[in-house]
Image: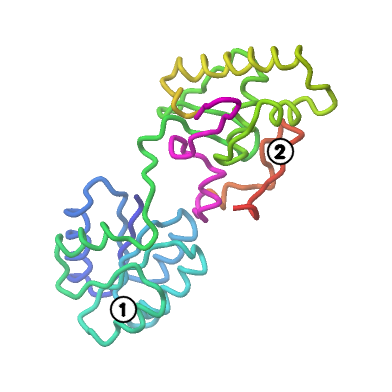
Amino acid sequence: MKIMCVDDEPLMLQMLEMAVREAKPDADIESFDEPEDLLDAAKESGCDVAFLDIHMSGMTGVELAKELKAVNPKMNIIFVTGFSEYAGDAMRLRASGYIMKPVTKEAVEEELSELRFPIIPKENALLKVQCFGNFDVFTPDGKPVHFERSKSKEIFAYLVHRHGSSCTTKEIAAALFEDEPYDNKQQSYMQILFSAMMRSLRKVGAENAVNKSYNSISVNVDALDCDYYRFAELDAGAVNAYANEYMSQYYWADFMFNDF
């Protein structure tokens, strides 16, 4: 989870950062004494939760929140202030929370436990998946996953592309082998490819990245840390990484952001 804090009063900023670190010690936390600096950082590297002092000189917290929502509508904004009359502004901006000063660990914990846009943890993902540029798959520590058959890797790519939607064997075959008839020979070949794909995933402890039932298969989106899925969530890092190339090695791969 990436958290950013801003307050133009050094002591208040120090207290805010301390409370956030105590409440969420494993988070990536950055602090700023200028709202413009936080805005630039959020545009560059993304932000899951922003703690904003409302009453700042220059750009106010409310004005900053409007700018941040333009960067990512699903960013969680938590206002921090000593003035209760700003609560109406917070609600109109659909803020995630509102904390009165002095900020405490307990108040931060309460707000983080009830975020308007819950953060799906990716640190426990079974696989890291790269869709921008060439499609590739890695273990959580960054080692490439070896697929014993290139078509098995392409099947996994297609499942990722479908973003958790269930597919039949025939649907996948139609995508991979567009002009070939779906006969008994091809059905048998598809079963060989599925088995090879699952062996490759099993070798790296990631067989649960795929859901299987009778003649239906899908990817388990919660098991993947995927740049394509992060883009759909308007993660700034993923948006910046997209350079108009998506699964470049596969002719069937069309970027489907508008379908989310």
Q: Which residue is mark 1?
A: 54
Q: Secondary structure at mark 1?
A: loop
204 versus 210 height, above or below:
above
197 with respect to 86 (left or right): right
Question: Quick one: label 2, few (<14), some, or many (20+) residues within 10 Å?
Answer: some
Q: Which residue is mark 2?
A: 253
Q: Secondary structure at mark 2?
A: loop
249 with respect to 157 (left or right): right
**Magenta segment boundaries in residue numbering:** 211-237
Residue drawn at x 40%, y 27% as measured from the top left: 141
Please provide percent x and percent y for residue 185.
Answer: 76, 12
Three-letter residue code for mark 1: Ile
Q: In which quarter of the view is residue 158 placed?
A: top right
243 versus 31 height, above or below:
above
Q: Nearer the viewer, residue 33 or 139?
A: 139
15 versus 134 height, above or below:
below
Q: Nearer the viewer, residue 21 or 219?
A: 219
Please provide percent x and percent y for residue 209.
Answer: 47, 29
